[in-house]
Image: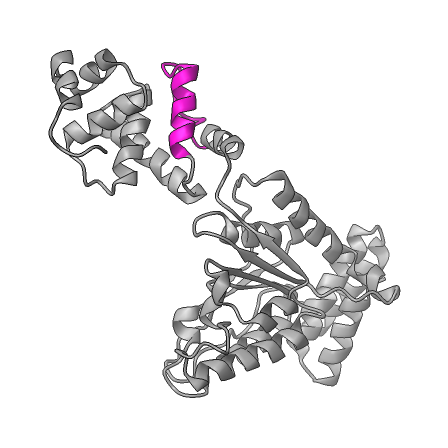
Amino acid sequence: MYYSEITKIIEAGLDRDQNKVKNYALLLAKKLAQDGDIKSSKRIETVLLRKNNGSAITDALIAPPVDQESRLGIVDIDYKPTAPEIILSDSTKARLNDFESTIKIKDKLDELGMPFNMSLLLYGPPGCGKTSIANCLANRLELPLVTARLDTLISSLLGNTAKNLRRIFDFASRQPCVLFLDEFDAIAKARDDRHELGELKRVVNSLLQNMDAYCQTGILVAATNHQELLDDAIWRRFQTIIEVPKPHPDEIRLLFGCITKSLDLSHIMPKQYSIIIKQLDGLSYSDIQALAQNVVKQMIIKDKTIASALDFLCEIAIFKYHGNLDQQELIRFLLKCGLAQRAIAEYFHISQRQVRNCLVSSKGDV
């Protein structure tokens, strides 16, 4: 029933690793309590308290690993990860829920001789929620999130990167946690890439070995924006692989509604709202959030209390063209969106004739 925790406790006892014994015993007590066996849970906690001379029990991760060259930490630890509000497609949510549910029944699968590799690979464009998914998963499993720091993990000294990888996996295996490897392609590139040095190929070999040892009992989440760079063998190591794409129009509408729920959008007509959603198509979740935050910032600067369609569409134009457009180009963008000349004129405090003149401007179209 609790095969994973009991196995970890036995391994830690044989290795004389007291911290690992305590951490997994606490997890076992927690699971027993959740399943209604309060008496057994309390007995475990009592033993731990007695052996700790009455000191408070904590599941804090102890002595995080450091790079031996720089002495800088190679992991970040969030003991209580939050679950940010994210909008995902129904299919993505279903697969994530299935992965989470399978982790929770891993003991039963082990009893049936159906071992489950607790590894998840997330891939897709940047800013689409991969890091948020890792946080949500750790939050829902009520586990710390251990995130590898690639800036210190990758060492300038030959052989140190592989050693750092080993330190991270060893550290994560000592206590219940979710290990998160972001920007995974930096350490998992294809070994047949002729542009890569032999040292990085050895890093991939080390990564594969560590994953094989860790993922039978530990939870691993990896994320990449460049899945095409990954070594073929890396793909085969993951039990679950999920694409996290840019949001579709229905998801954009939901996301936009969540982000702007604190704003007064009463002056935005349904047709204008649809235009905004259409112009947001192709942007990432983080792009859309940044746009909305910029609108709020501009409203505060201009001392406005009600947001208009033009507020959002102007920010969209500025974002799409990296701010590299003048007022005439901005007006042409708004006209292409179907905004009325009168509304544009009032927004920029100019005449409708000046707005019309933008249509025949000699400058290239936006």
Q: Which contiguous range is marked in magenta?
A: 259-280
Identity of the residue drawn at 43% across and 43% down: 284
Location of residue 210 with respect to 82 vertically, above or below: below
Horizontally, residue 285 falls left or right of residue 12, namely left
In which quarter of the view is residue 113 placed?
bottom right
Quarter holding the C terminus is top left
Horizontally, residue 30 falls left or right of residue 178, namely right
In which quarter of the view is residue 142 placed?
bottom right
Asked whether 278 falls inside the magenta stretch, the response is yes
Identity of the residue drawn at 45% across and 26% down: 261
Task: State whether residue 148 appears in this view.
Answer: no
Location of residue 280 with respect to 1 vertically, above or below: above
Give the residue furthest to the right: 112
Horizontally, residue 64 falls left or right of residue 289, namely right
Quarter holding the N terminus is bottom right
Horizontally, residue 95 falls left or right of residue 300, namely right
**Residue 25 placement (x, y as % from top left):** 74, 67
**Residue 348 placement (x, y as % from top left):** 17, 20
Q: Nearer the viewer, residue 365 or 353?
A: 365
Q: Nearer the viewer, residue 297 or 39?
A: 297
